[in-house]
Image (spheres, rainbow, N blue to C red):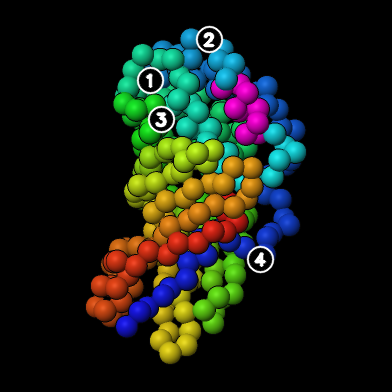
Amino acid sequence: MLLLVTIPVFASDSKSDQPTTKPTEFSINQVLDDVYALVDSENVKLFNEKNVEMDKELKELFDVSILRSKLEQFYTMLFYISRYASIGKDEFIIDRDSTIKLLISSEVFTNREFPKRISKVYLFRHSRERPFYKVLFDGDRVELNLNKGDGYGISREGMRQQAKALVFYGSFSFCLKKNGENVEAFDFEDVDLYGFFGSRGFINVDINYVAVRSVEFHKGSEMALVRAKVSRREFEINEHTWLLALVTRFVTDKSLQPLDW
């Protein structure tokens, strides 16, 4: 028996029109200033001097005339920080205050208050082209509501699939790499997508927790190649058959879709 549970992740056919914060005027110069102001926990600057190549990459990344998702901007900016930082360390903690200032000025989160929940950021870059980030939060369970709290929804498999929030379990870690011109985030840990997923038909399935395995952002678009599967926490929290638990352990959903948070 083949059981398919379609996972739309952040795909949407409905978006909220209600603003959550007062609009601000985006400034790429402020973003660059905040990148160069980054220091580690020992107050050592991540960048000793301006990097022309990084400036070019970041200006293109945040070009408001090009339609991009905030997710792509977030992960790609972190990739560039690892690639171009001149600090002579392979492992370090990035200063919290300068990190939060950058995340707010770059507007990579729709909810400008969310970065303030971050308590610590570790960067491991024994390979600058394949960095590992670990983000710690100020609580054991931190939620980031999607689409200003309205979530993202799409009708598939005979039911309304609705992605409501990202759930972080005290921390959040991932690796980054380049695939051609695209940045891919992968090996996610301690984060699930919460919502209402599943299927209706010969077999009815209801799922609340989905684990995203990897996301490859297609440069200069809102599209991304997403690999996801049913989270193991789904079976810790909700009651399911042993067969569903077994099948979903090996089944990964792969889809190309619009993506954002």
Q: Is residue 214 above or below residue 133?
A: below
- Percent coordinates x, y for residue 46 in the rendering: 45, 17
CA separation in Å, label 2 and label 4: 44 Å
Q: Nearer the viewer, mark 1 or mark 3?
A: 3
- Percent coordinates x, y for residue 5 in the rendering: 43, 73
> Mark 4 falls on what kind of element?
loop
CA separation in Å, label 1 and label 3: 22 Å
> Mark 1 falls on what kind of element?
loop
Residue 91 appears in the rendering:
yes
**Which residue shows up at 73% across the image and 57% down it?**
17
Sequence-wise first label, 1 or 4: 4
CA separation in Å, label 1 and label 4: 43 Å
Neighbour class for label 3 at 10 Å: few (<14), some, many (≥20)? some
Amino acid of disc 4: Asp
> Mark 2 falls on what kind of element?
loop
Residue occupied by mark 3: 129
Sequence-wise first label, 3 or 4: 4
Mark 3 and mark 2 residues within 8 Å of each other at the beta carbon: no
Residue occupied by mark 4: 13
Q: Which mark is residue 49?
A: 2
* Region in magenta: 54-62
Q: Which mark is residue 41?
A: 1
